[in-house]
Image (cartoon, coloured by chain):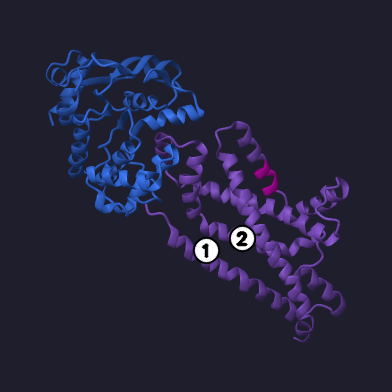
Chain colours: A purple, B blue
Amino acid sequence: MDELIEYGPDLLKGFLVNLQLSAICTVLALVLGTILVAMRVSPIPVLRAAGTTVVNVIRNTPLTLLLAFSALGLSDTLGLTFSDEPYDNAFWLVVMAMSIYAATFVCEALRSGINTVPMGQAEAARAVGLTFMQTLRLIILPQAFRAVIAPLGSVVIALIKNTTVAQAGGLLADAAFVMYDTFDTTGVSIPIFIGLVIAFMAVTLPIGWFTGWLAKRLAVAR
Amino acid sequence: MTENGHASPLVQMENVNKHFGALHVLRDINLTVSRGEVLVVIGPSGGGKSTLCRTINRLETIDAGKIVFDGQVLPDEGKALAKLRSEVGMVFQSFNLFAHKTIRENVTLGPTKVRGTAKDQADKRAMELLERVGIATQADKYPAQLSGGQQQRVAIARALAMDPKMILFDEPTSALDPEMVQEVLDVMIGLARDGMTMMVVTHEMGFARRAANRVVFMADGQIVEENTPDEFFTNAQTDRARDFLSKILTH
């Protein structure tokens, strides 16, 4: 218990990095995921193929490999940098990799949501004179989002937990890294484990409850 | 109402052909719809009636032939096609109201998003139309809270809100409970009296008799017979039509 108290402030600082990553990546993943799904259902074959390829490649690659690739491959070898400050650079590389990774799951969740919207509504929208993008934006996606709020909650929860592998992308700051670092000096501490688990659950459980509640509240009656 | 042939044609279909895979659903269709005309398309299931109806606003593409609407060949895609569709109303068998929008929003969506009509103006017009179809009191409800007949009347109001040059009705009463059919037909008969150009795919003989100028009988992807309702129902010329009528009129 003493270790948890002694290293608590460091761990908390690390945990704030997890929260920061989670918040930024959630927003980016939702935006990117929506763009990806628009590509996947678009009438333009090139866009469809591009969307499908991105989703299939990224979604089926282990996250740690994506992170290592963006740090070692994209940044170190190919020279993609976000900042001269090493910490900031690592942070944004991790944000990029994690956002794209989560975006592919957002995309697939939304795509299953789109399948819940009866085809006839898209036809009716087109028959009124709406363009494809208007139909998607005004009719299909609003209903698709509502249908998959709970699955999207799961994607966000997975994203939050996945921030603990940020060190694979060279970001040596999050709570899991601080934990390993602490174990190196103090030896393994069960209270620190438990403390971190509780910290994560304190964030992820309410998200699960909230999205479950929201899903019921916003369900589209048919 | 103008008699068939006197008014200028609104829709002209020339040698229209369409296949669904191996199935030849439209065979050499030649059909003209005049302005103000009410055309009923009748015939056995799978005969191509709905497909015919849906080609006019290009919800179905055609493989060969030509369709001219209001003097223009149907555009292939893009903005021009969206504009054409905004001028052709459509009422579907399964209503297809936007489930996440209120009744009022269902009616105002087209005018505000396609035509750029101001919201208060679109609202006012929507309420007039909902009044006309008898649903004004339900304007703030969602589609799922309405009966089938009410939903279909909203769908008609939604089509009317675009001030279309024509309305296509694709089996508008086939999904309704029997006691709700008449309320929808009454609205349609009202429209016909007001001179709306209508193409109606239906099995409702009563409607055809009361409101149609012309009946087109379709089977196996072909127009088998065209006639006035009275002539068609009492004195069909072809065996195929007589056979069909004998099956539906004896019950």
**Relative side of A210 to A97, left or right:** left
User: Type of residue at label 2?
Assistant: Val
Dot 2: what SS? helix
Q: Which residue is mark 2?
A: A156
Quarter of the picture containing the N terminus of chain A is bottom right
**Of residues B197 and B217, which is closer to you in this image?**
B197
Magenta stretch: includes residue A55: yes
- Tell me the residue at 78%/79% (across/down): A189
> Dot 1, how many residues are within 10 Å of its Cα: few (below 14), some (14-19), or many (20+)?
some
User: Type of residue at label 1?
Assistant: Thr
Q: Quadrant of residue A184?
A: bottom right
The answer to whether residue A115 is visible is no
Dot 1: what SS? helix
**Relative side of A46 to B37, left or right:** right
Q: Which residue is mark 1?
A: A211
Q: Position of residue B245 (x, y in %)?
A: 17, 23
Magenta stretch: includes residue B179: no
Q: Position of residue A12 (x, y in %)?
A: 73, 75
Q: Are marks 2 and 1 in contact (CB under 8 Å)?
A: yes
Marking on residue A56 = none
Q: Position of residue A203 (x, y in %)?
A: 62, 70
Establish whether labels 2 and 1 are both on one chain.
Answer: yes
- Tell me the residue at 33%/26% (across/down): B46
- The boundaries of the magenta stretch are A54-60
> Dot 2, how many residues are within 10 Å of its Cα: few (below 14), some (14-19), or many (20+)?
many
Q: Quadrant of residue A221?
A: bottom left
- Tell me the residue at 55%/39% (across/down): A41
